Image (tube, rainbow, N blue to C red):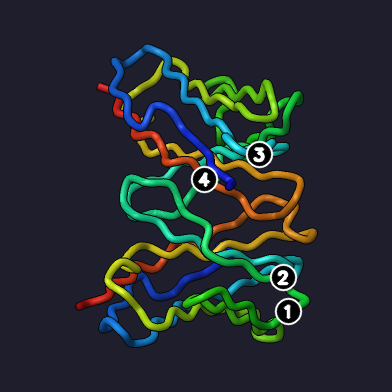
Amino acid sequence: DQQVKQNSPSLSVQEGRISILNCDYTNSMFDYFLWYKKYPAEGPTFLISISSIKDKNEDGRFTVFLNKSAKHLSLHIVPSQPGDSAVYFCAASSKGGSEKLVFGKGTKLTVNP
Amino acid sequence: GAVVSQHPSWVICKSGTSVKIECRSLDFQATTMFWYRQFPKQSLMLMATSNEGSKATYEQGVEKDKFLINHASLTLSTLTVTSAHPEDSSFYICSARADRGPEAFFGQGTRLTVV
């Protein structure tokens, strides 16, 4: 039973355009969500997070949107750059983020020059 | 800030031997550390959670006698794969979390190959 789902295994966008990565969750106890970026043979790098008390958090080119009623969050990257090409993992936690992280399977983003 | 160093980055060992992987938080105190395993084209599978000074909590299906975890200090946790077999070959990643926030920061991972 997968509690965090990233239904798109891959996404390809043109440089300069917007990348939108989606994530759905089923556990209503989740109240903290994170996005990580991962290159092959490296550990994930933390990108951005959001608490369930918010519906948007922005950091530079990265914005995360949370729709609690739909149990859906998305990561927007704009403008996309070739260096953004990587696998993006969505993760969720409960109790304000103090519980273990539950990861989705990841979406491989390719940004074409 | 929030740097986690994992060592070694890769290791090849013979079947039946044991391998130790270290995970260090370099610029913060990690009250909780996590160990993951990643299979090719799969997500991160949590193996265990460790809190400094106490026994690790293992996820269902993870053999605690095979994957020994020690969180001896607030900056160091180790994972020892005992009596390694080829099926233990994988990418192992640690992460560390400080008291100041829920974000977990990851090490660079260790590629273990058992021959």
Q: Residue under mark 1: which chain is it in?
A: A
Q: Residue under mark 4: which chain is it in?
A: B
Residue A85 has which mark?
A: none
Label pair 1/2, CB-CB below 8 angstroms: yes
Q: Which residue is mark 2?
A: A51
Q: Secondary structure at mark 2?
A: strand
Q: Amino acid at mark 1?
A: Lys
- Label 4 crowd bin: few (<14), some (14–19), many (20+), radius 10 Å: many
Q: Which residue in the rendered view is the most extreme toward the left?
A: A113
Q: CA distance from mark 4 to mark 2?
A: 20 Å
**Residue at point 56%, 34% (across, down):** B62
Quadrant in the picture for residue A13: bottom left
Q: Amino acid at mark 4?
A: Phe
Residue B28 has which mark?
A: 3
Q: Is A3 situated above or below A74? A: above
Label pair 3/4, CB-CB below 8 angstroms: no
Kindly indicate whether the residues beneath marks 3 and 4 are on one polypeptide chain: yes
Residue B5 locus on image (x, y percent):
49, 35
Q: Amino acid at mark 2?
A: Ser
Residue A54 has which mark?
A: 1
Residue A46 placement, left or right of A37: right
Q: Looking at the image, tell me whether mark 3 or mark 4 is earlier in sequence order.
A: 3
- Front-most of residues A33 and A85: A85
Q: Which residue is mark 4?
A: B106
Residue A112 showing in the rendered view: yes
Judged by depth in the image, the label closer to the viewer, 3 or 2, is 3
Q: CA distance from mark 1 to mark 3?
A: 27 Å
